[in-house]
Image (spheres, helix red, strand yellow):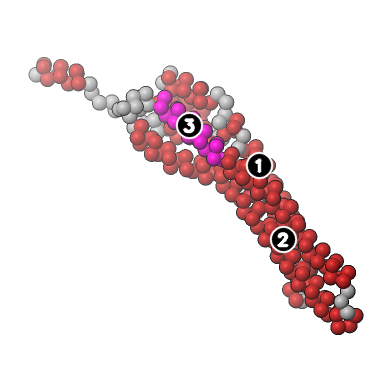
């Protein structure tokens, strides 16, 4: 039926635009609360873990962090679990782990960007198909009754509604996308700074780069010299 009467002159395009607007709004609300500083960097968690490190209670710190829901808690658990690493090894391993957390923070935000780019195109598609239908009707009636300006104007007005709807959805979603993208970037920087602060606390000897919890410390020079003297 001529592509379902040219998608009902573009009006059917309003359905996916409406659905995408709901999906985009849901993601914006979810990310807005998920990217709050208190969710990413729980208040007092760093100080509590540093206190347990100072008291040599890494097992207790690990139990606290094992099922922690925050990105900061998961990074600290990774640090505590691998506290036998040298500082260089820890930094290298944290880069990979940090990339995973950064990806998780920004993944849903990218969906908002995709929706804000797609809805104007859907609106334009609706307008184009609607305009095709309008000019087809005008052409069919022109030979019988002549061109009816009101029919032409009314058809164009209806066809342009989809473009207006697409832009109405896209503009606020794009603004929300840019805001949340900046929020993700700042959150990642804060995560890096706070995690490195704990790492530096765990490795007080920065020149040696050895963890205070390394299980196999090297024997001291004095003890080796004493054993030689006895021989």
The residue beneath circle 1 is 30
SS of the residue under disc 3: helix
| Chain-order first, disc 3 or disc 2 | 2
> What's the magenta region?
184-201
Asked if residue 151 lies in the magenta stretch, the reply is no
Quadrant in the rendering for residue 176: top right
Res 123 label: 2
As rendered, which of 66 and 156 lies closer to the eye?
156
Res 17 label: none
Quadrant in the rendering for residue 200: top left
Residue at 17%, 21% in the rendered image: 224
- Point out the frontmost of discs 3 and 1: 3
Asked whether, in this view, residue 99 is left or right of residue 114, the answer is left
Decide whether the magenta segment is chiefly helix, strand or loop.
helix
As rendered, which of 106 and 145 lies closer to the eye?
145
Res 193 label: 3
Q: Residues within 10 Å of mark 3 (few under 14, many from 20)?
A: few
Asked whether, in this view, residue 22 is left or right of residue 85, the answer is right
Q: Is residue 179 above or below residue 77?
A: below
Q: Residues within 10 Å of mark 2 (few under 14, many from 20)?
A: many
CA gap between label 3 and label 1 equals 25 Å
Q: Where residue 136 sits in the image (x, y, percent)?
A: 79, 76
| Chain-order first, disc 3 or disc 1 | 1
């Amino acid at each position: 039926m001529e592509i379902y009467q040219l998608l009902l002159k573009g009006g059917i395009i309003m359905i996916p635009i409406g659905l995408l607007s709901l999906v985009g709004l849901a993601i914006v609300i979810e990310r807005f609360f998920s990217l709050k500083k208190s969710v990413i960097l729980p208040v007092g968690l760093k100080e509590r873990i540093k206190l347990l490190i100072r008291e040599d209670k890494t097992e207790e710190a690990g139990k606290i962090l094992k099922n922690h829901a925050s990105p900061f808690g998961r990074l600290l658990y990774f640090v505590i679990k691998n506290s036998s690493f040298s500082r260089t090894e820890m930094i290298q391993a944290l880069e990979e782990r940090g990339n995973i957390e950064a990806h998780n923070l920004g993944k849903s935000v990218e969906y908002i960007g995709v929706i804000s780019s797609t809805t104007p195109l859907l609106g334009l598609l609706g307008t184009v198909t609607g305009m095709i239908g309008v000019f087809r009707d005008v052409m069919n009636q022109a030979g019988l009754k002549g061109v009816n300006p009101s029919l032409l104007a009314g058809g164009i007005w209806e066809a342009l509604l989809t473009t207006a709807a697409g832009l109405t959805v896209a503009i606020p979603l794009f603004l929300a996308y840019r805001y949340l993208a900046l929020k993700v970037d700042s959150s990642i920087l804060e995560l890096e700074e706070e995690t490195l602060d704990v790492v530096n606390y765990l490795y007080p000897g920065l020149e040696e780069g050895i963890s205070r919890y390394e299980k196999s410390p090297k024997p001291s020079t004095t003890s080796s010299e004493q054993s030689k003297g006895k021989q």
